[in-house]
Amino acid sequence: MSARVWFFDLDDTLHDASHAIFRAIDARMTDYVQHHLAVDRPEANRIRRDYWLRYGATLLGLVRHHGVDAHHFLAQTHDFDVAALVRAERGLGALLARLPGRKVLLTNAPAHYAAAVLRELAVHAHFTRRYAIESMRVHGRFRPKPSRSMLAAMLAREGVPGSRAVLVEDSLRNLKSAKSLGLATVLVTAHGSGSVRRPLYVDAVVASLHELPRVAARLPRGC
């Protein structure tokens, strides 16, 4: 039987983005919307949240409805030193090393920010590939999580069927999309999800990533 491929989300999964980083990103996104759309701050904050809820990423709404340059937006809103803000569990490198199977990063964040966080966590060497939002395109259009078409294209690129893949995430809607393609799903509650009733499309719930080796044997898998 072939080894699994583990797909890991980044923010609030590999590290506690809710501790400080999300506030920094949200503030910069609101600044960006306020400036480029010429609206007041409450309206800018409403637009930012509305597009995130509707599309899974504020970026998509700004590109679709306002012609914003995606790369400029990503550069401006994630331009800060992550080192002072990152908080995470200890021993992640050792955990990833002993978890059997390839590890792939799958994040709606931009590549330069993801790389900085992985370096700060000292886990960058454990990921054989990284999918950031810049690479989440289908037929030339941005399709970040929870897009099924993007996930299907990513699985094809990795050469792995959904039945041999696991998505480790803090977002229920992303896990629901992954489960529809046959992936095993693990919900991480350590950094903000809190206590939740486990939906049928979630195979396991962990409060700490260090629980993954224990639950791995119970996850469904194909040949």
Image: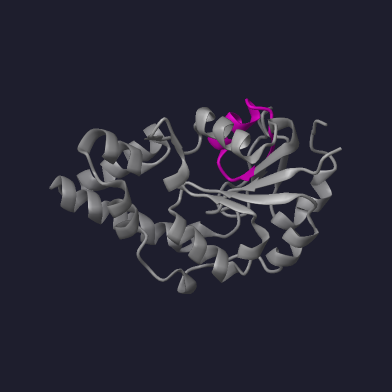
Residue 90 lies, in percent from the top left, at 68, 69
Residue 8 lies, in percent from the top left, at 62, 49
Residue 131 lies, in percent from the top left, at 53, 48
Q: Residue at x 62, y 69 (%)?
A: 122
Q: Does residue 157 belong to the magenta stretch?
A: no
Q: Nearer the viewer, residue 93 or 210?
A: 93
Which segment did they paint magenta?
168-185
Which quarter of the rendered picture does the C terminus lie within? top right
Q: Which residue is situated farthest in the left direction here?
A: 38
Q: Residue at x 34, y 43 (%)?
A: 59
Q: Residue at x 55, y 53 (%)?
A: 10
In the displayed structure, would residue 118 be above or below residue 193? below
Q: Nearer the viewer, residue 171 or 192?
A: 171
Query: Can residue 152 be seen in the rendering of this structure?
Result: yes
Which quarter of the rendered picture does the N terminus lie within? top right
Residue 61 image-quadrant placement: top left
In the displayed structure, would residue 144 be above or below residue 132? above
